[in-house]
Image (tube, rainbow, N blue to C red):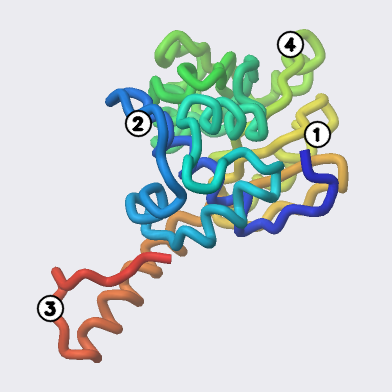
């Protein structure tokens, strides 16, 4: 494993590598070159090699990469292969979507509890996940430690919720609230701003219009 700091751009590409390699494995492809993998992912062969070499030299010139070995290696880098229990605060549409999505449990992410303030949500069970009153969050974490917390609350309470999670032992927060959370150095946070992603789409549409292109033109994606 490389000891130097890996850039955020490389880290953001790792899940894509894992996904493409997993799909290649499913259809029986056992070996692939950096050029072939880059063509599938919309990246250059040079970028593929640079990214993968950040974590050790795995391919062979003229021979390419062993798909299963590279997929397993990247999965190890991403921390897959173990179970992560997570809690969700905010049992609205986003929180329920996280609980319902089967792909998370297939990767080892297991929602164990949800929390909300709405009386009509408290006491419900969503895909096997019970919903508790948010006032029970501290006590629950004391009894059932979880490393990952999902915040899908209004912005005005998100920081307070995150602080309670951290005090309860949560060390990674997936934040869907429309605010950037402030966390200590020993806690990692991924702030997901859904509106930002949508604005990227409108930017690309606007650029196509300025260039006189039709909306279905093939525009490269970063």
Q: Are marks 2 and 4 in contact (CB under 8 Å)?
A: no
Gap in angstroms between the C-alphas marked 4 and 3: 53 Å
Disc 4 secondary structure class: loop
Q: Is residue 200 visible?
A: yes
Query: Considering only vertical position in the picture, is 166 above or below 46?
Result: above
Above/below status of 159 relative to 150: below
Distance of label 3 from label 2 (alpha carbons): 31 Å
Q: Nearer the viewer, residue 75 or 117?
A: 75
Residue 35 on image: x %, y %: 41, 54
Q: Nearer the viewer, mark 4 or mark 3?
A: 3
Label 1: state its secondary structure: helix
Q: Which residue is mark 1?
A: 166
Q: What percent of the width, then of the height, locates residue 33?
A: 43, 46
In the picture provided, is 163 more to the left or to the right than 30?
Answer: right
Q: Earlier in the sequence, mark 4 or mark 3?
A: 4
* Mark earlier in primary sequence (1, 4): 4
Residue at 51%, 18% in the rendered image = 122
Mark 2 lies on a secondary structure that is helix
The residue that disc 4 covers is 144
Q: Which numbered disc, 2 or 4, marks the residue closer to the eye?
A: 2
**Marks 2/1: CA distance?**
36 Å
Query: Are discs 2 and 1 less than 8 Å apart at CB?
Result: no
Give the percent coordinates (x, y) of residue 52. 61, 47
Residue labelled with disc 2: 23
């Amino acid at each position: 494993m490389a000891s130097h700091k890996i850039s955020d751009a490389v880290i953001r590409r790792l899940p894509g590598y894992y996904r493409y390699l997993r799909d290649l494995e499913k259809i029986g492809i056992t070996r692939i070159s950096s050029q072939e993998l880059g063509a599938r992912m919309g990246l250059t062969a040079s970028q593929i090699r640079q990214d993968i070499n950040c974590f050790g030299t795995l391919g062979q010139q003229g021979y390419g990469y062993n798909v299963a070995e590279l997929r397993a290696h990247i999965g190890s880098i991403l921390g897959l292969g173990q179970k992560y229990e997570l809690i969700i605060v905010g049992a609205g549409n986003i929180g329920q979507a996280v609980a319902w999505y089967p792909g998370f449990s297939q990767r080892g992410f297991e929602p164990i509890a949800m929390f909300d303030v709405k009386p009509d949500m408290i006491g419900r069970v969503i895909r096997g996940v019970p919903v508790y009153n948010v006032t029970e969050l501290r006590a629950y974490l004391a009894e059932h430690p979880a490393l990952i917390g999902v915040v899908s609350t209004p912005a005005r309470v998100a920081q307070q919720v995150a602080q309670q999670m951290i005090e309860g032992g949560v060390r990674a927060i997936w934040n869907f609230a429309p605010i950037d959370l402030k966390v200590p150095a020993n806690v990692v946070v991924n702030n997901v701003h859904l509106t930002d992603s949508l604005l990227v789409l409108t930017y690309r549409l606007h650029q196509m219009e300025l260039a006189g292109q039709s909306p279905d033109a093939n525009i490269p994606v970063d």
